[in-house]
Image (cartoon, rainbow, N blue to C red):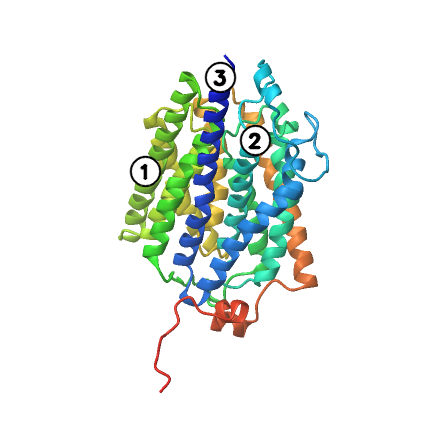
Amino acid sequence: MEDIVQIKYALDTFYFLICGALVMWMAAGFAMLEAGLVRAKNTTEILTKNITLYAIASVMYLLVGYYIMYSGDEGGIMPNLGLLIGSENAVEDVLAGGDDAPYYSARADFFFQVVFVATAMSIVSGAVAERMKLFAFLTFAVIMTGFIYPIQGYWSWGGGFLSEAGFSDFAGSGIVHLAGASAALAGVIILGPRKGKYGSNGQINAIPGANLPLATLGTFILWLGWFGFNGGSQLIVSNIEDANAVAQVFVNTNASAAGGLIAALVVARILFGKADLTMALNGALAGLVAITADPLSPGGFQATLIGAVGGVLVVFSILGFDKIKIDDPVGAISVHGVVGIWGVLAVLLTNSDATIGGQLLGIVSIFLWVFITSLILWTILKAVMGIRVTEEEEYGGVDLSECGMEAYPEFTSSK
């Protein structure tokens, strides 16, 4: 019997680690997607942001974030403060059995959770692209990943008041995606639009990305990583029922992404008369965000429809934000915020345990906490160190002004 327990523990730990590695690979997806959707002159800077924010998230969540998120009292609002991630599970505690016995490594749990907080911060990166100072962004990342995200994460996954109220969010349509989009929206409002994006007469000027093959590659990477994002959130795979559940989550995740992409492409064709690749890419991501709050309860066809609604929403949301001059170069606020809200509400369609009161309370609480704290922090950073590059630096590209190098240098003879 002890051998069986050890095998199950090893299997669930391995499953958790592999899913975490898939989610970590989403950092590459965000980097490629954003690098493809910005102009060539801003590519190095956005790549620097993406790889550095992952490192910052890893350090801050190790130091304080994980403790904040998982050490508070049940039903509470404010978590406990502390450092580091605690000790590993003891062999005797695992072999003792019982309902409270750990069944996977504590370090595996930390690794899986840390890649989630990095995902939330990656959402902010694309929305503020092409005009923000690099070190202002990285300073924000320290507070976002160390404190703002973990506190609202504690409210749900750490046993806080949203958990007690019945808020249901399986893998984070609200906790991860809406949180990241709320921080991004606050930053975009304080930062303002890129120069030339909006004309004085209400004109909206398209600013195409430099590398659509790279953006498409990024979307495929994110699609792949999402199987770990949602599949790992089942938390166990070592028995028949849970193994079947993980398989259903994979099927639904894929189906929702496909539904989102097709719906966005069709809507774009109707509105613009052309197949808009960028809308299709965002449609796939919208489908993934939409199913994340509950990728287990629906059947495959239901998941496809949930994703399709997300794909329709994201097209109209991107157009709507442009009309009110909210400049989001990659559509992150629409994909992760607007569709994140839809994903949380869509839980009500297939999960009888969810309540509309609990879901609405979760949406409002997450948005207000992250948006208001982020708005305050962005304002402080603007006053203390400035958050926007000069107009001249923006015109020349933030690659040179912030990083001193170009992603696509022209190799010419010195003669």
Q: Residue 335, how many percent across, how many down?
A: 45, 45
Disc with the residue nearer the chain's start (3 vs 2): 3
- The residue depicted at 53 percent of the width and 71 percent of the height is 401
* Residue at image point 47% right, 16% down: 4
Residue 288 against residue 327 in the figure, above or below: above
Residue located 65% across and 46% down the image: 372
Mark 1 or 2: the one toward you: 1
CB contact under 8 Å: marks 1 and 2: no
Residue where numbered disc 3 is placed = 3
For the point 42% across and 58% down, which residue is it?
A: 35
Residue position for label 2: 360
The quadrant where residue 147 appears: top right
Q: Is mark 1 on a helix, strand or loop?
A: helix
Q: Report how far apart the C-alphas of labels 1 and 3 lie in the structure.
A: 42 Å
Q: In this view, does 59 lie to the left or right of 217?
A: right
Q: In which quarter of the image is residue 380?
A: bottom right
On residue 258, which mark appears? Answer: 1
